[in-house]
Image (tube, helix red, strand yellow):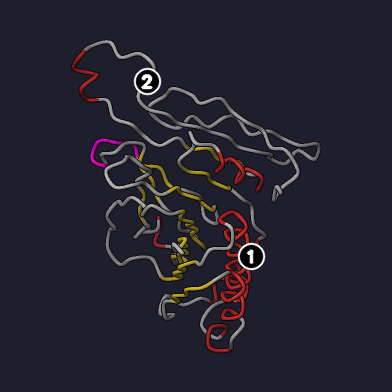
Amino acid sequence: MPIFTQPHPTAEISRFPSPKPESPVFNDQGRPGAMLFMESWPAPKIDTPEDAALACPAPHVVACAHAAVVMDLQRPDVDMVVWGRRVPMAWEISLTEWSSSSSPLTLFGTPSEIADCLATPAVRQDWPPVILTDLRDLSSLFGALTGGVRQHIRLMAPPSGEAAFELPPDVLRLICGYGRTGAEWCGSQDPKSGIVSALSPFAVAFIKGAAEGEPGCLHRLPASVPNGAMPGPILVMDTVSR
């Protein structure tokens, strides 16, 4: 049974070496609507053997402002789905109360067990309510997408130094950056030569895992914030095999 019933715009896979954002779609009130982009690699035509030797697969990514975009995870040709949601200003105001000294939160369990843990006083005193409520809702959504399997959740401050790019294990991974931070991903299997893109704050990325030796979506947690703004916490959620 589908989670979302409202359709969302779709896009053909474009053949460009970097994401090509479409122009925003505006609704009747003049507010921006959905954003879409997809990426694939290599280009459809390789002119020389030298170019062919350098060609390598890159992730297929689809992004949309509508939550129904997560249904594209069912597509075998999509490696990462980004829900570029817009959140109330009150969320950002609430995060001013957050301190980067908060103890990291690590949880294992089913969505219902996660929800029970998030309601305990020990957890509620360390993290803003808006984040804990969002974490509970994302855990529920994640569970609906994965059949309710156990989850490994980490809520933490951004790393103090530059993090290395990594492939997710052969599971589904969710990443969300709160405040002024956002995860980064690479449009190539070689971060030194690929184009690195940053997700917007509060965007939720669903990254499919890669089997050993297979290409996947390289990503990393951000370590620095432009203009010295206070970094927000990072949420990482993985499925746990039964």
Q: Position of residue 25 (x, y in %)?
A: 68, 33
Q: What separation in Å lies between label 1 and label 2 (alpha carbons)?
A: 39 Å
Does residue 175 sit above or below 54 in this rendering?
below
Task: Name the main secondary structure of what is drawn in magenta.
Answer: loop
Q: Nearer the viewer, residue 134 or 153?
A: 153
Q: Residue at x 72, y 41 (%)?
A: 31
- For image coordinates 32% across by 36% down, the residue present is 188
Disc ID at residue 43: 2
Q: Quadrant of residue 214?
A: top left
Q: Which residues are magenta?
A: 191-195
Q: In this view, which residue lies farthest toward the bottom?
A: 121
Outermost residue, right side: 28
Q: How many numbered tags mark residues here?
A: 2
Asked whether 102 or 143 is in front, the reply is: 143
List the residue tagged with mark 1. 137
- Seen at 23% across and 40% down, the residue is 192
Residue type, numbered disc 1:
Asp
Residue 226 drawn in magenta: no
**Kind of element beneath mark 2:** loop
Q: Residue at x 67, y 60 (%)?
A: 88
